[in-house]
Image: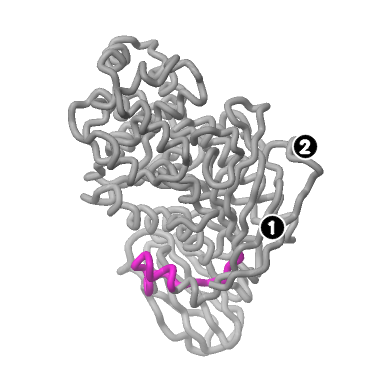
Amino acid sequence: MKKLFTLTLCLALYCGAFAQGEIVSYTKTNTLTIADLDSVLASFGAQGLLTPEYELDVYKVLYRTPYRTLNNLVTVSGAMVVPKNTQCPVPMAMYMHGTASDRTGVPSYGSQEMNIGLLFGMLGNIVVLPDYLGLGDSDTSVIVHPYIHAFSQANDGINMIRAGRHLEDSIGITDNGQLFIFGYSQGGFAAAATLREIETNYPTEFNVTAVAPMSGAFDLTGAQKDQIGSDSAYATPGYLPYIILSYQSIYGNLYDSIQQVLKSPYDSTMPALFYSKNYGIGYINTQATPVPKAMVQDSTIANFEADSLHPLRLALAESHLLDWTPQAPVKLFYCSEDEQVTPLNSTNAFAAWTANGAPNVQIQNLGAYDHTGCVQYALINGLGYINGFRTGCVGITEKDANTFELFPNPSTGLVILQTKKDAAGTVTVQNLLGQQVHSSALAISQSHTLDLSNLQPGTYIVRVQQGEVLSTKKLILN
């Protein structure tokens, strides 16, 4: 990876002058070559499965977003990945990252999840990645990241999209109007929360094409709430004090003193760890008790379980995502052996959204993997889902999109390929994971029959190469 010069642009005289989503500053931090991106694919174990199509520029962006209330704007950071030398406008995709508690464990600081932005960018998407309030280069007034707080995560995302559009204007590019949102773990929750906020409050500003929430805590008043009072050990016990401290920072009514909620020594160790923003959640988990509720005062647990109007229960209800009806296409991805975010979150969300009348909600169990093992399967399948909606440059540089036609399309397997000139060439067919599933030569003729009846139903990309001219079209097999 080549480090580039730093270019910082200040767009106003003082931060307070900015509106939501406006850029405070941006910095180009990296340019990645195809060789660099091959190394990224290798880190995912995906070399040979996907092929980098574009070199990338990476930017760090500081922008304005609400903290606690809509009119209290603070500065927060994020990253933006821009494919280079595209021949047509490409979609914008937003990736929302998983749980982080250390300030630098976020995309703009080059966390492992930044590679997910690179993965989607190299295939022809502009990718924006918010760091979230309290993390990255967030305003110091945010004492702790508002963890699993729907309003905060949604506005982080919405204003990252706005900032991304402002940056597009500054660097002279444009997207094609398509907008995809996806995320894993906390990011899965954040992706769904962002869609809810957009459809509720900004339906005319944003046209969301599709959303892929992966292994998120959607059912906060059900499946996740039950874990608070559980007597069982939990893989990530630090999540409970993280939520308590975060919600107190937002609402201010969970307790008068931390000692009312957390037992000693956790009443001092947990705030110190989370407020410092110097420790990763993995380390914090080792400082917590295996059974999360063992850190909490018995009276607090009893009141929480008995009182339906307990402040923490009311706070969880505000961020609960099942009492809503997604209008954009949504596909939930999860794994059945997830020990951190119970699969009930996804199955309950699917059942609730379907019952609510959502027009296009799907769900996929990716297999018997734990939370960490599920990541790569979620991302690859999420990429395939998103690619099924893409228009225009579908992950490749198109020299000419109009040199052939396919019919019928959709097809049951036998496809007529009609070229517009008599010239020898080749035709290849790829699935949405970039895998080649068919290849054949084209004779000097304008009409060719392709037998693709051996392929599974789905969306495919047909490429025709005739001399120096490469053309592509999308094909749907039923």
Residue at the (63%, 74%) spot, across then down: 400
Q: Tell me if residue 46 is in the magenta stretch.
A: yes
Q: Secondary structure at mark 1?
A: loop
Range of magenta residues:
39-57
Which one is nearer the viewer's eye here, 170 or 49?
170
For the residue carrying disc 1, how many other residues have a C-alpha within 10 Å: few (<14), some (14-19), or many (20+)?
some
Residue situated in front as seen by the camera: 30 or 323: 30
Question: Which badge, 1 or 2, comes first in the chain's sequence?
Answer: 2
Question: In percent of the image, x 48 and y 84: which residue is there?
Answer: 426
Q: Which residue is mark 1?
A: 174
Does residue 387 show up? no
Amino acid type at mark 2:
Ala
- The residue sitting at 81% across, 43% down in the picture is 13
- Horizontal arrangement in the rendering, residue 363 relative to residue 277 (left or right): left
- Locate the C terminus by quadrant: bottom left
Q: Is residue 257 above or below residue 130?
A: above
Q: Amino acid at mark 1?
A: Thr
Q: Is residue 178 magenta?
A: no
Q: Are marks 1 and 2 in contact (CB under 8 Å)?
A: no
Q: Which mark is residue 17?
A: 2
Quarter holding residue 355: top left
- The extreme right residue here reads 13
Q: CA distance from mark 1 to mark 2?
A: 25 Å
